[in-house]
Image (spheres, rainbow, N blue to C red):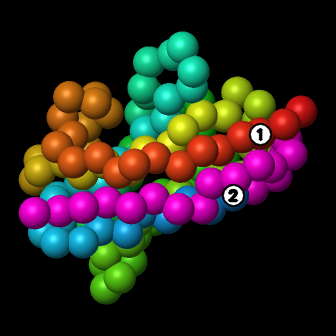
Amino acid sequence: QVQLVESGGGLVQAGGSLRLSCAASGRTFNVMGWFRQAPGKEREFVAGIRWSGSSTYYADSVKGRFTISRDNAKKTVYLQMNSLKPEDTAVYYCAADRSPYTISHTTESYDVWGQGTQVTVSS
């Protein structure tokens, strides 16, 4: 009933910025999250936000550099990425979670996933 489409990835120099977008169609779930996966590594949580309220959650590796936000009218979630590092290089995925209470940081908790968008940071 819900589909997610990511956009905004690309190639950027270390220290630069990118903004990712995740557009939701159909029924929206309670929590939206951003994950990333580099070649040969496990998919890891980056940031999460609820559709209502003000709760957000960030992985330690991106705190102070990344900001997650939402536009409820457009049913879109954003990830502003500043001070990018080569280790941020990965495919970034948007995901939706039905949980009405907390922002989960585990992949198993999310029910719907987007197709992913590539982010490459050069040194």
Residue 45: name its quadrant.
top left
Q: How far is disc 2 from disc 1 in space, using C-alphas? A: 10 Å
Task: Tell me the amino acid under the disc marked 1.
Answer: Val
In magenta, the rendered stretch is 1-17
Vertical relation: 113 (above or below) 41? below
Q: Is residue 32 left or right of residue 10?
A: left
Residue 40: name its quadrant.
top right
Disc 2 vs disc 1: Cβ atoms closer than 8 Å? no
- Give the labeled residue for mark 1: 121
Farthest residue, direction top: 40
The N terminus lies in which quarter of the figure?
bottom left
Residue 11 appears in the rendering? yes
Q: Magenta stretch: residue 115 in it?
A: no
Task: Tell me the amino acid under the disc marked 2.
Answer: Leu
Residue 101 appears in the rendering? no
The x and y percentages for residue 118 are 60, 44
Q: Is residue 101 left or right of residue 55?
A: left
The x and y percentages for residue 22 are 42, 63
- Give the labeled residue for mark 2: 18
Vertical relation: 65 (above or below) 39? below
Residue that appears at 66% across and 34% down = 88
Residue that appears at 24% across and 72% down = 25
Nearer-the-camera pick, 30 or 101: 30
The C terminus lies in which quarter of the figure?
top right
Sequence-first tag of 2 and 1: 2
Residue 6: name its quadrant.
bottom left
